[in-house]
Image (cartoon, rainbow, N blue to C red):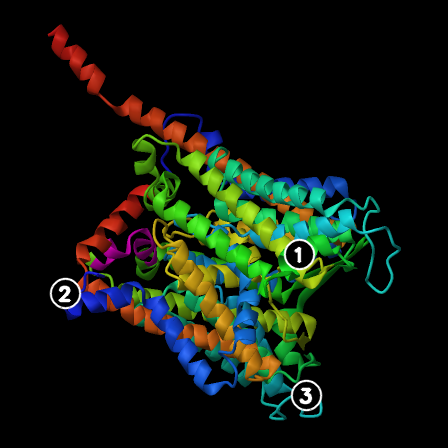
């Protein structure tokens, strides 16, 4: 059924979907060593904590596939969360680093479209500056991150704004038939974007732009349009993630999302999305997210000294990467070596 | 450099745009605030960004070969904490070894180099993606910093240890205050000079550019690519250890969060200085311009008493403006090249000659 004829095909299949093998191994190892790791409440927990990361990873994966990066997404998360709380909460003097909102007390049903549009607009702005003004994507999105984070701090004056309304919190904290809404929404987004990237023309254009922008231009479509759309989607998804995170915490913290970008990029790349563009799949990125969420959860349950958690997490990721590298090496030997050469040639052509 | 044709002055300016930014920012802040030009502040600009500068130098090296090392910000923290623990008494939170400061400095540089070696070997010999290795190492090293720290900051080091980061070479007394020539500032300038000479005028430096431009071609040309990349990562690790030494020396303290979240700013400074994350482009002196620009913005905005909440916003906007000008520069250069190529081409002329004859 899968077209397996011999041992080579089996190995090939295994290495192509290697991240899933790693996932199963991780589940087996943690499941057998940690009590109740594979229980329903804990799996739900893993999925809930993975959902915000997961939404951000979709946007980042799109950018990576187009051979770009979006460092501004974590800034969008901050700003969107602060904006939403600021617009919805009643006015209150700041005390003990807690404050109320602006005092306009908008309805969540008005605020949600506002923040989603804001996120999309930020993304559009990134894309426009990068493609139409030819500005360096790394610095544009880095600068945008600084601007957005700064605005979030300036609006909130560094204070926490607790008590967002229930209707707003539904996405992040609500449940439908016992299943968290955030998990359903995240899976839904993965299905939609997975379909778009693998089955629709837009997806093929993104891969084409990522593999070789000049060739894409020569073949008659506008890379600018595609990339601007990619960034707009990334901004929109970052706003979704901000909405989700704020809904789960029920309080806006201006430092929300700080340092998330590294985790997001790591999840995407672990899931097989290449930094060099034109490679990887949305479903693979999803596996990367699951892997990180499972590791984080296991570290919590194992009562690792909080001072050492980061070190242990980093080590586990490192081990996974080393195993992954062995796989690529195997594939590199098995697959035609000229393929790598061709990719390299494309790349240098695109750069010169 | 031998650029015939269109306006050479403009070309010269366009090629050194980063220095125009630096001068422009310098003049702008001098006009906006009367305290910016005070001798004290001028002496301070380089001192405050000395550690940042060493991190940029480390990234300049890796960028040239088309690699990056995100873990340097954590190496800074770990080496500084490691040194602090070896220096102070156990009552002050250390390990109570109270080693000689020079030995400690040597050990922290060795630690930095070993971290670099580890990164380099994983990337070249094991074949792990460079971004992921260094992100994972960023977590590992930061975690280890927290793990070995007593949970708080450690302070009060011997004079020999803090000399490089906090010492002064000379103090010039003027009416407006003192101009302090800091050891750290001079050290960073020297480090960038050495780096420039090393990458520009040695065989190894040329190999670095070759690897960054096209690793396969470099390999085909007989360059030992793995060796070059590993050495570059070791250099980056040692630079990060120097950054830790400078930072700990300036603050006379080591905290577990030292250097955290610096890495993207470091990359920003290197890229604005003309480096490319895809390798083979830019030079170390340009990267130094990036450091200067960043620290002028930092001290300038601070001295103008911009609210800390708005500093990030204005820093981001200024950065955007700088990249916009840089993009215009690239467009201009492309136009110039196109014009020169057209002027040099003889296709049209040839045809005419033939038809005439």
**Residue A249 coordinates in the image, percent (x, y):** 69, 63
Mark 1 or mark 2: name the one nearer the start of the chain: 2
Query: Residue A135 got which mark?
Result: none
Query: Residue B93 got which mark?
Result: 3
At 62% from the left and 40% from the top, the residue drawn is A117
**Residue B249 coordinates in the image, percent (x, y):** 64, 73
Q: Main secondary structure of the magenta part?
A: helix
User: CA separation, marks 3 and 2?
Assistant: 64 Å
Q: Mark 1 lies on which chain?
A: A
Pick the residue in front: B190 or B143: B143
**In front of the other: label 1 or label 3?**
1
Q: Image check: A65 left or right of B175?
A: left
> Would residue B299 be counted in the magenta stretch?
no
Query: Residue A170 got which mark?
Result: 1
Magenta stretch: give its range: B208-219
Circle 3 sits in a helix, a strand or a loop, which is it? loop
User: CA separation, marks 1 and 2?
Assistant: 49 Å
Q: How crowded is mark 1: few (under 14 residues within 10 Å), some or many (20 or more)?
A: some
Q: Is residue B68 visible?
A: no
User: CA separation, marks 1 and 3?
Assistant: 47 Å
Q: Which residue is most to the front?
A: A177
Pick the residue in front: B47 or A342: A342
**Residue A65 coordinates in the image, percent (x, y):** 39, 49
């Amino acid at each position: 059924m899968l077209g397996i004829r011999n041992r080579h095909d089996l190995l090939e299949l295994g290495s192509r979907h290697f991240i899933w093998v790693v996932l199963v191994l991780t589940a087996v190892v943690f499941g057998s060593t940690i009590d109740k790791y594979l229980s329903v409440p804990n799996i739900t927990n893993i999925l809930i904590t993975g959902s915000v990361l997961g939404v951000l990873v979709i946007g980042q994966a799109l950018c990576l596939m187009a051979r770009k990066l979006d460092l501004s997404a974590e800034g969008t998360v901050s700003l969107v969360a602060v904006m939403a709380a600021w617009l919805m909460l009643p006015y209150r003097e700041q005390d003990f680093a807690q404050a109320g909102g602006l005092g306009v007390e908008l309805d969540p049903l008005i605020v949600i479209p506002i923040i989603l549009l804001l996120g999309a607009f930020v993304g559009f702005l990134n894309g426009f500056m990068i493609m139409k003004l030819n500005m360096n994507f790394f610095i544009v999105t880095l600068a945008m991150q600084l601007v957005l984070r700064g605005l979030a701090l300036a609006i909130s004056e560094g204070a926490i704004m607790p008590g967002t309304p229930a209707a707003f919190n539904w996405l992040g904290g609500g449940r439908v038939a016992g299943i968290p809404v955030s998990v359903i929404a995240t899976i839904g987004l993965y299905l939609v974007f997975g379909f778009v990237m693998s089955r629709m023309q837009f997806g093929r254009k993104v891969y084409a732009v990522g593999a070789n922008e000049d060739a894409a231009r020569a073949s008659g479509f506008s890379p600018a349009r595609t990339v601007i759309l990619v960034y707009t989607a990334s901004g929109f998804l970052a706003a979704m993630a901000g909405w989700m995170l704020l809904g789960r915490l029920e309080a806006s913290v201006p430092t929300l999302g700080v340092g998330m970008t590294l985790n997001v990029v790591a999840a995407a790349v672990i899931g097989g999305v290449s930094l060099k563009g034109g490679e990887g799949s949305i479903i693979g990125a999803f596996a990367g997210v699951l892997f990180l969420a499972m590791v984080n959860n296991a570290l919590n349950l194992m009562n690792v000294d909080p001072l050492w958690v980061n070190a242990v997490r980093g080590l586990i990721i490192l081990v996974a990467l080393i195993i992954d590298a062995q796989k690529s090496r195997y594939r590199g030997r098995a697959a035609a070596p000229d393929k790598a050469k061709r990719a390299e040639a494309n790349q240098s052509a695109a750069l010169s | 450099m031998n650029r015939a044709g269109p306006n050479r002055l403009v070309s010269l300016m366009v090629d050194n745009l980063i220095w125009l930014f630096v001068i422009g920012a310098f003049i702008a802040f001098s006009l906006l605030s009367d305290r910016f030009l005070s001798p004290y502040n001028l002496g301070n600009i380089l001192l405050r960004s000395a550690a940042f500068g060493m991190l940029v130098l480390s990234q300049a090296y890796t960028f040239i070969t088309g690699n990056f090392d995100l873990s340097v910000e954590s190496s800074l923290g770990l080496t500084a904490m490691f040194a602090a623990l070896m220096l102070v008494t156990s009552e002050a939170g250390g390990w109570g070894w109270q080693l000689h400061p020079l030995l400690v400095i040597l050990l922290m540089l060795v630690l930095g180099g070993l971290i670099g070696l580890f990164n380099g070997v994983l990337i070249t010999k094991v074949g792990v993606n460079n971004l992921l290795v260094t992100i994972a190492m960023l977590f590992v090293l930061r975690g280890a910093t927290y793990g070995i720290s007593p949970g708080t900051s450690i302070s009060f080091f011997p004079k020999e240890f803090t000399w490089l980061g906090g010492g002064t070479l000379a103090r010039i007394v003027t009416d407006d205050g003192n101009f302090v020539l800091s050891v750290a500032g001079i050290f960073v300038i020297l480090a960038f000079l050495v780096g420039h000479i090393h990458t520009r005028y040695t065989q190894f430096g040329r190999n670095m550019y070759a690897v960054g431009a096209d690793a396969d071609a470099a390999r085909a040309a007989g360059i030992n690519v793995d060796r070059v990349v590993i050495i570059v990562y070791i250099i980056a690790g040692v630079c990060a250890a120097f950054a830790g030494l400078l930072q700990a020396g300036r603050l006379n303290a080591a905290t577990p969060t030292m250097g955290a979240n610096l890495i993207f700013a470091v990359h920003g400074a290197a890229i604005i200085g003309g480096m490319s994350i895809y390798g083979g482009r830019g030079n170390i002196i340009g990267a130094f311009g990036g450091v200067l620009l960043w620290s002028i913005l930092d001290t300038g905005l601070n001295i103008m008493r911009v609210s800390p909440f708005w500093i990030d916003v204005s820093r981001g906007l200024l950065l955007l403006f700088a990249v916009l000008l840089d993009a215009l520069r690239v467009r201009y250069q492309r136009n110039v090249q196109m014009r020169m190529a057209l002027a040099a081409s003889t296709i049209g002329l040839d045809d005419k000659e033939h038809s005439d004859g």
